[in-house]
Image: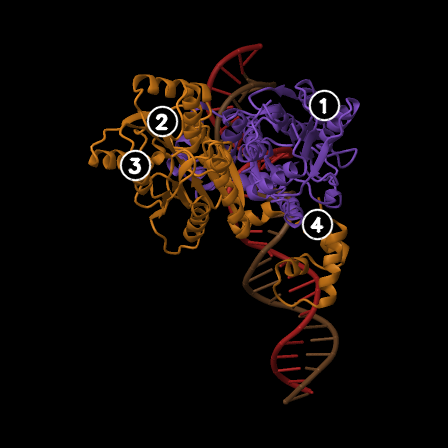
Chain colours: A purple, B orange, C red, D brown
Amino acid sequence: MATIHDVAKKAKVSVTTVSRVLNNRGYISEATRTKVFKAMEQLHYQPNEIARSLLRKQSNVIGLIIPNVSHPFFSELANYVENYAYEKGFKMLLCNSQLDPVKEKDYIEMLKRNRVDGIIMGSHTLQVEEYINLSSPIVTIDRQISTEIPYISSDNYMGGSLAAKLLLAKGCMKTAHICGNLELQLLANQRTTAFKSVMNENGVEPIIVQTDMDVFNQIQYAQMIRQLFEDHPDIDGVFATSDIIAAFAVKECAAVGKRIPDDVKIIGYDDINAASWMMPAITTIKQPISQMALTAVDLILKQMNEEEFHLENIHPVSLVERATT
Amino acid sequence: MATIHDVAKKAKVSVTTVSRVLNNRGYISEATRTKVFKAMEQLHYQPNEIARSLLRKQSNVIGLIIPNVSHPFFSELANYVENYAYEKGFKMLLCNSQLDPVKEKDYIEMLKRNRVDGIIMGSHTLQVEEYINLSSPIVTIDRQISTEIPYISSDNYMGGSLAAKLLLAKGCMKTAHICGNLELQLLANQRTTAFKSVMNENGVEPIIVQTDMDVFNQIQYAQMIRQLFEDHPDIDGVFATSDIIAAFAVKECAAVGKRIPDDVKIIGYDDINAASWMMPAITTIKQPISQMALTAVDLILKQMNEEEFHLENIHPVSLVERATT
DNA sequence: TGTCATATGTCAATCGTTTGACATGTCAAA
DNA sequence: TTTGACATGTCAAACGATTGACATATGACA
């Protein structure tokens, strides 16, 4: 691959001059400028960003750590993050932790070794706190891990509350909530808190099912949901913590002959693309994924430039009512 | 951030010694080794991979260019590619071209500037040929662009053929096929070729609908499909070029009161996760996405190491029959 | 005593680019 | 004639690490 020296030689100018046209600094005549550009073109010259990064101490790379891009929520998030990063002149390194604590730690270190300008952390297993010594800008999604690292989430409490209210308004008397592991200190837990609280206020005690399952393990989920309905055949409303789980619930209801929404009403969370094109289309709590991605990139940039930023970045959710309620 | 010099100073050894323990070369006593490791730990030292890359002329980064990670096929692909890359000690830079030729070209150049070790090209708009002057390893997905660049695809012809045969076996007499723009020289076009050919052999002339639409534009697709059924109310079988389009078709059929699979049978392509948990679950032609990703990473590695590789890498497909046929 | 494996150090070059300091030269305006 | 804007060049240091050449020292073994 051609270097700046090759270009200089070809254009019969000094390396400094090439650098000057490349970076638009100092005086350069139109004549040399074109001469240099022509040489670059002929040589298919592309400046070595690695060398630049080394000197500048800036890689223009953002690392995104998520459990798994094949999960629609994260794939949509990744898409937006990448888009905004691109707009700002950044690239995105994608890391799938598979929710493996070892891999998670490994990725953080890898990203540091590669001197990324910032890390967006969307995967949370263990006490990541120890690994993170805020040397580089970082933002977390859905988890508060310190009072210095900004975090992003949707208004989980509002989400849980909206779901509860809708089910109550539709006349549900016996509800269930399927959520993740509440021991991980995720902000998503507030969905559960809110749901339970609103239900209780209305005299309903919801059944709470925690699960650590891989969200793609349809068979396990099917079993779990089937069990739930066997144990509580009178359930008439389900609030799932993701649209995919809601979809599994829909499927399972159909399998056991419960009609949706007549017998059971189901609400999901996220509003992934699929929620709208599934059948029946899923009623859900919409997270503004695009906005959240924008905020994430923005927070990295602000930290890089030592600008002010908010620690807490909670985005409003909205209820999208479709065919399952 | 600490440098190797800081570590050397802290451990009271020379930089060379630190480098030696870091890279496991030359003689090092256990005592100094631990001394050095301790210093590294205390300083939270992480070797600067940028500096290493510059010297080694190897970034250990693979670039993946795809239209959009939020498309399930590509998100699953990206997930696998990242996993395999990680196993081999590589990182993955993700680029969403949004099928914008400008962005596509831009990304290729960006990846070259960043001296990635290889590019996996899954997005194809224009004559990318001109941009690619095979300086770095590259592999394409679903497109043959030269006789030197290896390409990966599923056995599209077999896929189209399987779909046609299934519809025929189920007694379909009037079939439609929804595909992408056939003018782009994609290998996926063979699905169409095969489908048409098998149908013709059996005396059926399928209706072929080409479309350039954004696959997420549900409204446009719905209109298009509705139009299709209005123009040809007797259609009893549809072969869509992706599961998402198949899902739209399912939805539209339901909307106009056609029963699936009784009135209309629908087959998708890809076998994305969602295909199995949708309702009704979609009959589809399964691409071995994981295998394809593995091959992609492998082909990059083989090119890097100047090993032999196959130009054509076609992966077998299989029919997964579910509820829409 | 000599030799050799082990252990560590010094030094300098290299990767490709940027940048500041400084020199030199041209040309036009004052 | 002087001044200063414009144009280009030379040179060297820097970014953080690796590596080869070479020097030196210790201890063990023959």
**In 3D space, how far apart are the residues under numbered discs 1 and 3 (Cα atoms)?**
49 Å
Q: Are marks 4 and 3 on the same chain?
A: yes
Q: Do labels 2 and 3 touch, CB within 8 Å?
A: no
Binning the other alpha carbons within 10 Å of mark 3 as few (below 14), some (14 to 19) or many (20 upward) gives many
Residue at coordinates 59% horizontally, 19% vertically from top-left? A321
Q: Which label number is shown at residue A161? A: 1
Q: Are marks 2 and 3 on the same chain?
A: yes
Q: Check disc 4 and report the residue beneath it.
A: B45
Residue at coordinates 61% horizontally, 39% vertically from top-left? A226
Q: Position of residue A159 (x, y in %)?
A: 69, 24
**In 3D space, how far apart are the residues under numbered discs 1 and 4 (Cα atoms)?**
46 Å
**In 3D space, how far apart are the residues under numbered discs 4 and 3 (Cα atoms)?**
60 Å
Question: Could you tell me how many numbered marks the image carries?
Answer: 4
Binning the other alpha carbons within 10 Å of mark 2 as few (below 14), some (14 to 19) or many (20 upward) gives some
Q: Are marks 1 and 3 on the same chain?
A: no
Q: Nearer the viewer, mark 4 or mark 3?
A: 3
Q: Check disc 2 and report the residue beneath it.
A: B263
Front residue of this view, candidates B95 and B290: B290
**Chain for mark 4?**
B
Residue at coordinates 42% horizontally, 53% vertically from top-left? B302
